[in-house]
Amino acid sequence: MCRVAEQRDPAHRERGRRRDQFVDVVVQDSLRAGGARCAVLRGGAYRTAVQLIEISDLIVAHDPRTRERLPVRRADVVERLRRTGQHRAARIAEGLPAAGGILDPAAVDRRLVAVHTELQRLSEELRLGDRLAALLRPLLDAVRQTRPGPVRIVDIGCGLGYLVRWIAATGVLGPDVELLGVDLNAALVAEAERLARAEHLPCRFVHGDAFQLDEPGTVYVSTGLLHHFRDADLDAFFAAQGRPGTVAFCHYDIAATGLAPIGAWVFHRARMRDPLGRHDGVASARRAHDDATLLRAAAHARGLVPLLYEPRGHSNPFCTTLRPVLGVLPELVAPLSAALDRNARRLVGAAG
Amino acid sequence: MSAVLLLLLGLLDAAFAGFRASNGRDGRIRRAAGNRRAALRGLAHGAPGLLAAAAVAGAVLLGSDDPAARYRELDEAGLRMLVVYGPYSALVLGSLACYLVGPFRLSTLAMIIGLGPLTLLRPPVVVAGAVAAAWQSLPAAVVALTAGVAVLLVEPVVHRRWYTEPL
């Protein structure tokens, strides 16, 4: 819901308020059911970030049913970016190779692989693997206490599969973990698979929809994905994870702080060479969802308790550039808090 | 003395420049060997430039009517350079130490307020050091210009030669 629309349309605002109340009740009930002993976060206004677009979201299109690659007209991409006032992005899009006005898919794929390889450097420098492992280890400890058998971790929108490959390379989560990366972009999946094979890593990558796999994930994870979804799409993304067999999710995204766009600009300027990557990196930070929005959306995963780890006010923004929203089965909340030990104070739920 | 310290700093910077030139091009997880190779490539490209600066300094000394006075002039210029580069290098090395040995939150902090912004500041710092050296000394300006250009060229040259495409 757009803030401007809320201000202009009282009915719209009222619908939003009722919806917020409903979500808060769900969250509170879930927390009670889980016996959570963690801090409570009070939701603020339902904020939608600036409606910026990332170039990489526009230059690849797939048929939603068949996932077949669709041709993309360069002029359409340029026009769409201009309409949102992103003139620099429009100029970058104008420079993309095209034949007969249609973007060259092979060139686009090469560019995206190059940008994602540069992006991996940022993930490495921000120690994203360690950050994820610090939370997934206690989470999996809690899962193992309540549910025997192997754990299947599915990385949604895995890109080059850095996190999956890092976990596989370090073995940090133990040997009973099956690691699977899934992405809609075939070129990125192929590159992830190639890199994993080059290092003989015990993980797999699949081109497709993470929610249409033959077997669901025990735990769904992602990094830098959530800001690509807005409003109903964000709710639907979480709703899809409330399914039998899934015990938790853990999605890291950019912490929506005032520092995030500045930090993103500095880092993408210092570490990335491709102007497309630099643009999209800063746009990502500006599109990041705030904590209250994520908690409300996460409540749509039926049967899972929505939580935030290291939200604003509980962390130093210089130390926490990305923070996760979690969902866990109610019976996992108490063991998770216990496994986190002192760090349980960083775990926050929601209340109306 | 200042010349030796500056040479060591220049070589260290060249190794880091080689490492940076390679970054973002190899998506593998374990690539310590690749990082070492990149650092050596940086050194291999930085050393000739620094030697050229040393040769220019030697020529300036030999061409002087009073080599001892010219040496003192160059040494003072080198000290002015170190006044600029010393604190910057200390900040970089301190941040790097925190990044490498600290827990991940400290590492992130070292990266966010240290290594990331300091990388962006590096070219202006190199220029500031050269300007400080060149202050009221034309011979020092020639040497500093040669050294500054040599230092700043390492990363783009290594990148263009070996790392334009993902490996």
Image: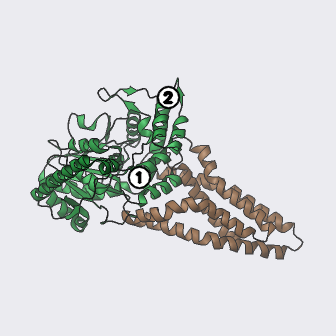
The residue indicated by pointer 1 is: A285
Q: Is residue B127 above or below residue B82?
A: above
Q: Is residue A30 above or below residue A68?
A: below
Which quadrant holds residue B72? bottom right
> Among all residues in the image, which is located at the extreme right?
B65
Q: Amino acid at mark 2?
A: Asp
Q: Chain of mark 1?
A: A
Chain in brown? B
Instruction: Classify 10 Å Cα crowding around label 1: few (below 14), some (14-19), many (20 and above).
Output: many
Rendered image: mark on residue A303: none
> Among all residues in the image, which is located at the extreme top?
A100
Nearer-N-terminus badge (2/1): 2
Instruction: Report the Cα–Cα distance between label 2 and label 1.
Output: 28 Å
Asked if residue B70 lies left or right of residue A176, the reply is right
Chain in green? A
Asked if residue A183 lies left or right of residue A344, the reply is right
Q: Residue A54: where, in percent of width, then height?
A: 43, 42
State whether residue A183 appears in this view. Answer: yes
Q: Chain of mark 2?
A: A
Q: Give whichever of A170, A154 is nearer the camera.
A: A154
Report the residue at 55% width, 71% height from top.
Answer: B90
Instruction: Classify 10 Å Cα crowding around label 2: few (below 14), some (14-19), many (20 and above).
Output: some
Report the residue at 49% width, 54% height from top.
Answer: A265
Which quadrant holds residue B84? bottom right
